[in-house]
Image (cartoon, rainbow, N blue to C red):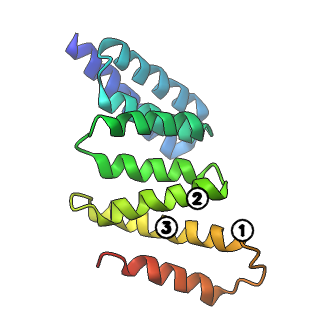
Amino acid sequence: MKAVFRQNLRSGLRHLKLYGLDHDQKDLRNAERRFKASLAQDPGSIEASYFLGVVADLQGEPDRAIQQFEAVLQREPEFEAEVRFNLGVALYHKYHARDLYLAQDQFLQVISARNAKDFLRLMSKASLAQVKAQLMIRRGSEQIIDDQVQVLFEEASCLSE
């Protein structure tokens, strides 16, 4: 039973990786099918639930992704920073001001997390700068100049250093 679960999980990850190479929606559907099969074998699998959230966001379904990520976070996974980063990305993909502020909170938590990998912190800093730029645009700042955007990226890169 565990062998089938792991096989489905590995196969789902392989399809997810293939999607990253060629962006073929078929790979996302295959990955989703494999992660669901993993959950059928082990309904308590945090990993399969997490990757279903990743797939949902890549399929343009941020609400479904957010539900998956929030459910995973309730179970206090060892890879919490990664889940929070992807939750922030899914919230960003909703493009509503309220969700942008929630995304900002997730990115800040990743940046300050002691167990976050450096790459994840860097990605969170860049994402935080994007969120701040979106919020600035939404406030009606029509005359955004490159210097202002550069300041946002510099502010984000200085966090938690």
In percent of width and height, residue 150 lies at 55, 84
- Mark 1 and mark 2 in contact? Answer it, CB < 8 Å: yes
Identify the residue position indicated by label 3 in the image. Answer: 128
Viewer-nearest residue: 72 or 18:
72
Residue drawn at (43%, 56%) of the image:
106
Question: Of label 3 and label 1, which has the lower sequence position?
Answer: 3
Q: CA distance from mark 2 to mark 3?
A: 9 Å
In the displayed image of the protein, which residue is found farthest to the front?
98
Identify the residue position indicated by label 1 in the image. Answer: 138
Residue drawn at (47%, 69%) of the image:
126
Tag 2 secondary structure:
helix
Identify the residue position indicated by label 2 in the image. Answer: 100
Up-down relation of residue 149 to residue 54 (above or below):
below
Q: CA distance from mark 1 to mark 2?
A: 10 Å
Q: Quadrant of residue 68?
A: top left
Instruction: Specify whether 136 is left or right of 78.
Output: right
Identify the amino acid type marked 3: Leu
Question: Of label 2 and label 3, which has the lower sequence position?
Answer: 2
